[in-house]
Image (cartoon, grey):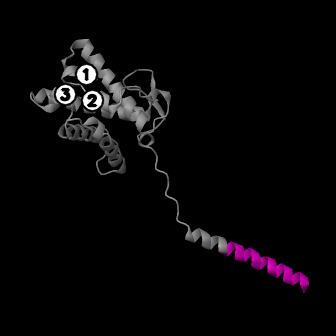
Amino acid sequence: MRNFSKITLSVLLIASASFTSCNNDDDEPTPEPVKASIYTRLGGTTMVADPDNSGQMIEKGRLSFRKVVNSTIGLIVADVQANATGNLKAHFAPVLAETGATQATNIAKLSDNLTDFFSFNTGGTNAVNTYSGLNMVAAHDPAKNPRMGTKSSSADYTKFVGYVGAAANANGVASNTELYTDIVAVLESLRTPIVQK
């Protein structure tokens, strides 16, 4: 009988511990899953063939950003050419005044710089995504960056954000997605240092 009582007591203790453990799990909130970085959601570090550089590979996240950046630059150039008096024309005048190979080279540098910036600041951790340019205030102040024609107004920046959104849409990021919303949030976090007039 004594052995039976010890066994019964042991079973009751184990059952009690299990029941208590189950109850504690129910009382604790389930932790939110960690959201992958924007860079990861755009393809991350998966290596793919670089469509612009034959025989070279590129991280898919970086390629995604480069496509959006290049599409954005294309939209800005088209706007500037269509609007002889638009604010974006004044802002980008020094870059667009460059001619021939110099202009192509400097627009390519602008594309690389923006791709570096967005890749680095949205989760791109490899050395290729290192941003070493000016801080946002200096980069958008014509007194510190001669490649800026004028300071940006809030309306100029809103137009720029719209072009990035259109470029993201054109490159497969739909407006009604969490990824799109997160990209816009990054852009909006930069409004204060960029808008200087």
Task: Give the quarter of the figure containing the C terminus.
Answer: top left
Q: In the rendered structure, does residue 14 fall within the stretch colored magenta?
A: yes
Q: Is residue 121 left or right of residue 136?
A: right
- Name the residue that disc number 3 marks: 150
Q: Main secondary structure of the magenta part?
A: helix
Label 3, label 1: how far apart the Cα atoms are: 9 Å
Task: Give the quarter of the figure containing the N terminus.
Answer: bottom right
Helix, strand or loop under label 2: loop
Q: In the rendered structure, does residue 116 fall within the stretch colored magenta?
A: no
State the residue at coordinates (21%, 16%): 98
- Circle 1 residues within 10 Å: few <14, some 14–19, many ≥20: some
Q: Position of residue 68 (x, y in %)?
A: 31, 34
Helix, strand or loop under label 1: loop
Q: Which image quadrant for residue 66?
A: top left
Label 2, label 3: how far apart the Cα atoms are: 8 Å
Callout 2, which amino acid?
Answer: His
Q: Which residues are magenta?
A: 1-19
- Residue 109 to residue 125: above or below: above
State the residue at coordinates (18%, 23%): 93
Callout 1, which amino acid?
Answer: Arg
Q: Earlier in the sequence, mark 2 or mark 3?
A: 2
Residue 194: give its label. Answer: none
- Name the residue that disc number 2 marks: 140
- Name the residue that disc number 1 marks: 147
Q: Position of residue 44 (x, y in %)?
A: 46, 38
Q: Earlier in the sequence, mark 2 or mark 1?
A: 2
Which residue sits furthest right? 2
Label 2, label 1: how far apart the Cα atoms are: 9 Å
Callout 3, which amino acid?
Answer: Thr
Helix, strand or loop under label 3: loop
Asked if the residue under mark 3 is in contact with the one under mark 2, i.e. CB atoms within 8 Å, the reply is no
